[in-house]
């Protein structure tokens, strides 16, 4: 079956306490809605900093979460000088330390991961697309630099919009654009 | 069969005339040998510039060639603001215009490509590995972000060292390192 591609550039999720340290009284304001219902990108950005370099203009995604999380690509990790693990969102057990700099303050947290390739799906879409009890799939990507990517995790949530999230390394390796349609393979 | 990975960061090949414009009397000096016999990376670097930004410290590879060529990743192309085609080295028919800045001068050439995924091979290795008359193969990549890449071109030359060249997007999407061993698939 087909699924739409959504490309995640490096970004930051913040918990309430860290937001206050970084932004003080400055409110976070909506720049644009994301396809996942209720989620949006903010006008506000932060700087993230590793042992080697910093990267500016890293967007904050909202709403605030229970935890602070910085998602980067492997390419970003070389630029920054960090060695984050590949993890599902929220799985921060061994996330890599990274410094986040906002207009009002600075924090260092064990918060940096490379996000797994994953597909957001609702329970009803899961039934519709025959993806019940399936933890991960492979996905076929066509075009001039075609191929197959494995270990694409199925992430179910109540209101999910059915789409596959890839980071910029995966997307650029296969010359993908947002909203491209690609093919899920169940048994590879 | 197995093949070793060599990762190509963005780099520049120069023809004699363009070298003289960019470097004048400054000699190009060897920094390190590459695995392909006779090829080496120079200590000297240039700046490359598109419509959006420039990237500094782009290494010059030697020896000089009959043509000037700038090889970037898709990620680099977004940074620079250029839209190069995916082409085999030397196939510059519709290469994208790019500006190259050296210590003594500046040139703009239709020279920018994203290099195809490719495997360097000698005639004898081609016979040994059953790759005669084969234009391209797929390659299986293992690890946490595993998968398969297609359209890996077989590039024969007399003295070739048997290795697969990937750009940093492909390498980073699959978390590959230099000298990793990966598996060629003949019929996918």
Image: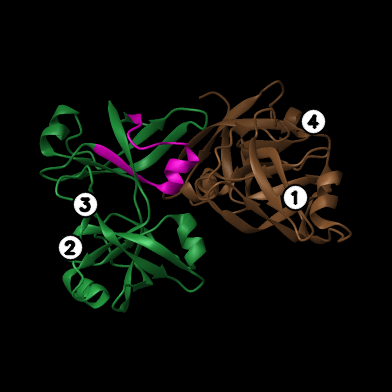
Chain colours: A brown, B green
Q: Is disc 1 in contact with disc 2, using a CB cutoff of under 8 Å? A: no
Quadrant location of the C terminus of chain B in the rendered image:
top left
Given the image, what chain letter belongs to the residue carrying mark 2? B
**Do the dots labelled 1 and 2 sit on one chain?**
no
Distance from Cα at disc 1 to Cα at disc 2: 49 Å
Given the image, what chain letter belongs to the residue carrying mark 3? B
| Residue A35: mark | 1
Asked if residue A145 lies left or right of residue B164, the reply is right
Under circle 4, the secondary element is helix
Foreground tag (4 vs 2): 2
Distance from Cα at disc 1 to Cα at disc 3: 47 Å
**Do the dots labelled 1 and 4 sit on one chain?**
yes
Judge the density around disc 2: few (<14), some (14-19), many (≥20) Cα neighbours within 10 Å.
Answer: some
Q: Which residue is mark 2?
A: B64
Judge the density around disc 4: few (<14), some (14-19), many (≥20) Cα neighbours within 10 Å.
Answer: some
Residue extent of the magenta highlight: B163-183
Q: Is disc 4 in contact with disc 2, using a CB cutoff of under 8 Å? A: no
Given the image, what chain letter belongs to the residue carrying mark 4? A
Q: Which residue is mark 3?
A: B40
């Amino acid at each position: 079956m087909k699924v739409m591609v959504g490309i995640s550039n490096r970004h930051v999720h913040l918990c309430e306490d860290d937001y206050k340290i970084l932004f003080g009284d400055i409110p976070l304001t909506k720049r644009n809605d994301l396809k996942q219902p209720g989620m949006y990108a903010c006008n506000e950005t932060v700087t993230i900093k590793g042992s080697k370099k910093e990267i500016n203009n890293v967007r904050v995604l909202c709403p605030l979460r229970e935890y602070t999380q910085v998602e980067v690509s492997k390419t970003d990790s070389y630029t920054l000088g960090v060695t984050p693990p590949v993890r599902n969102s929220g799985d921060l057990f061994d996330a890599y330390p990274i410094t986040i700099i906002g207009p009002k303050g600075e924090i260092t947290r064990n918060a940096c991961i490379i996000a797994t390739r994953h597909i957001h799906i609702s329970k009803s879409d899961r039934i519709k697309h025959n993806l019940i009890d399936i933890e991960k799939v492979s996905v076929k990507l066509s075009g001039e630099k075609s191929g197959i990517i494995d270990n694409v995790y199925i992430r179910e949530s109540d209101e999910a919009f059915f789409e596959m999230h890839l980071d910029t390394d995966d997307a650029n390796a296969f010359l993908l654009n947002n909203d491209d349609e690609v093919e899920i393979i169940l048994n590879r």
